[in-house]
Amino acid sequence: MWGTDNTTGKSCTNRQGTMSSELAPLCGRLMRILRDVSVDLAARHIKGEDNDLADGLSRHMWEFTAAD
């Protein structure tokens, strides 16, 4: 089970595809990879206000060096 606040990602995962012509190739590739490695993936929605950790990580200004 994958928890996400991204409703598009949730829908693509649970429906195993998308109507979006831009996302269809990516969703298809993901579904083929998961099938090839015998992984059954499902997603559940996490409300944005309940997703403090991800929000905090995505808003942090990370500093990277050439070694990264």
Image (cartoon, rainbow, N blue to C red):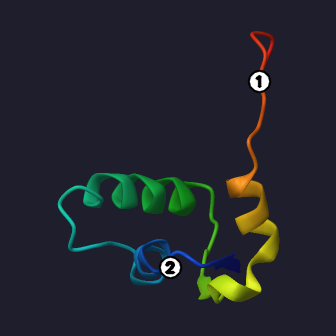
Q: Residue at x 60, y 81 (%)?
A: 42
Residue under pointer 1: 64
User: Could you say whether the residue bearing mark 2 is in a helix, strand or loop?
Assistant: helix
Q: Residue at x 30, y 59 (%)?
A: 23
Q: Nearer the viewer, residue 63 or 27?
A: 63
Q: Residue at x 78, y 63 (%)?
A: 56
Q: Residue at x 42, y 81 (%)?
A: 11
- List the single residue furthest toward the left: 21
Residue under pointer 2: 10
Q: Nearer the viewer, residue 15 or 21?
A: 21
Identify residue type, mark 2. Answer: Lys
Across and down, in percent, residue 27 comes to: 38, 61
Across and down, in percent, residue 7 comes to: 47, 81
Across and down, in percent, residue 40 comes to: 61, 75
User: Which quarter of the rendered picture does the C terminus lie within?
Assistant: top right
CA–CA distance in space, label 2 to label 1 = 30 Å
Q: Nearer the viewer, residue 32 or 49?
A: 49
| Mark 2 or mark 1: whose residue is earlier in sequence | 2
Q: Nearer the viewer, residue 15 or 4?
A: 4
